[in-house]
Image (cartoon, rainbow, N blue to C red):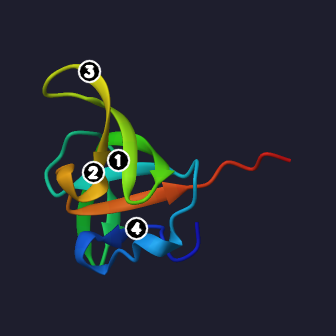
Amino acid sequence: VKGLDSILREELEIEKLKLGDIIYFLVDYPVTPKPIKIKEKDYYVWHMGVYVGDSLVIHANPFIRVVEIDNIFDIPFYAIYVTRPDFK
């Protein structure tokens, strides 16, 4: 999604997210084999969720192993990468 592809946490403009956006949460230590480069630094996908509006994301919380809805900023991440399904 233009404007939301590989963006740092502090640069996130929440109003650019739309219902159904798939959010990949990125951290700065290797947890996947292929990094995503942002401003010359490597970030790695560690978690994902679906945006449901009002700054909320539905995701399977890996720490307590339940599906829940949380504020996006309550989920640990340094950056995100967003894809938007095309429901045509």
Instruction: Report which residue position mark 4 lands on.
Output: 6
Task: Residue at 40% x, 77% y: name it.
Answer: 13
State left or right for residue 40 relative to residue 16: left
| Circle 3: residue type | Val
The N terminus: image quadrant: bottom right
Badge 4: residue crowd in 10 Å (few <14, some 14–19, many ≥20) = many
User: From mark 1 to mark 4, how far is it between C-alphas?
Assistant: 14 Å
User: From mark 4 to mark 2, how far is it between C-alphas?
Assistant: 11 Å
**Residue 32 vertical position relative to residue 10 in the rendered view, above or below:** above
| Circle 1: residue type | Lys
Instruction: Report which residue position mark 3 lands on.
Output: 66
Mark with earlier residue (3, 1): 1
Whether label 2 touches label 1, CB < 8 Å: yes
Instruction: Report which residue position mark 1 lands on.
Output: 34
Dot in front, 3 or 1: 3
**Residue 65 vertical position relative to residue 11 in the rendered view, above or below:** above
Q: Secondary structure at mark 3?
A: strand
Task: Residue at 38% x, 59% y: name it.
Answer: 55
| Circle 2: residue type | Tyr
Instruction: Report which residue position mark 2 lands on.
Output: 44
Of 58 and 81, nearer the camera is: 58
Q: Return the x and y of residue 5 as percentages of the image width and height.
A: 48, 67
User: From mark 3 to mark 1, how far is it between C-alphas?
Assistant: 27 Å
User: From mark 2 to mark 3, how far is it between C-alphas?
Assistant: 23 Å
Of 31 and 14, nearer the camera is: 14
The image quarter containing residue 84 is: bottom right
